[in-house]
Image: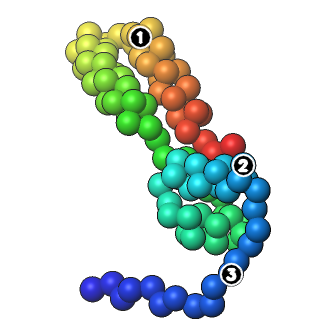
Amino acid sequence: MKEPKKRGPRLSIWLSEADKEEIQDRAKKAGLNLTDYVVKAARGVEIKERISTQDRDNLRKIGGNLNQALKFSNTHNVLSGEIESLVKQIQSILTGCIAK
């Protein structure tokens, strides 16, 4: 069983409302709570946004199409142009998931 985190000293900082909202938004997009996000950022850890539900659904659909294209390609011993198109779509979606 995992031990609960022990809290240490508290650190308070002053922020503008805009900075506070931006940090909270980035933490949410990364799927982290505010404390974990700030600590990772302060340590210089690269923080990436989580993939959105819509992008995950799109990847599932593309994956299904890719499997069908590969099955056809293997059955008929041909490389379909559709496969290249699907790979480019996947790369495009994944590129959008990299943290800015």
Residue at 55% across / 26% down in the picture?
Answer: 92
Q: Earlier in the sequence, mark 2 or mark 1?
A: 2
Q: Amino acid at mark 3?
A: Leu
Label 1, secondary structure: give it. Answer: helix
| Between 53 and 97, the one nearer to me in the picture | 53
Q: How is the image coloured?
A: rainbow
In the picture, the quarter occupied by the C terminus is top right
Whether tag 2 and tag 1 are in contact, CB under 8 A, the answer is no
| Residues at marks 1 and 3, CA–CA distance in whole angstroms | 54 Å
Q: Where residue 38 sits in the image (x, y, percent)?
A: 64, 67
Label 2, secondary structure: give it. Answer: helix
Answer few, some or many: residues within 10 Å of disc 2's Cα (few below 14, many 20 plus, some between 14 and 19): few
Q: Amino acid at mark 2?
A: Ala
Q: Is 92 left, or right, of 80 in this rendering?
A: right
Asked whether residue 98 appears in the rendered view, the answer is yes
From the image, state whether disc 2 or disc 1 is nearer to you: 2
**Which residue is labeled 2 in the image?**
18
**Which residue is labeled 1 in the image?**
82
Answer few, some or many: residues within 10 Å of disc 1's Cα (few below 14, many 20 plus, some between 14 and 19): some
Q: Earlier in the sequence, mark 1 or mark 3?
A: 3
Q: Is 83 left, or right, of 61 in this rendering?
A: right
Residue at 63% across / 85% down in the picture?
Answer: 10
Q: Which mark is residue 65?
A: none
Q: Which mark is residue 11?
A: 3
In the picture, the quarter occupied by the N terminus is bottom left
Q: Amino acid at mark 1?
A: Glu
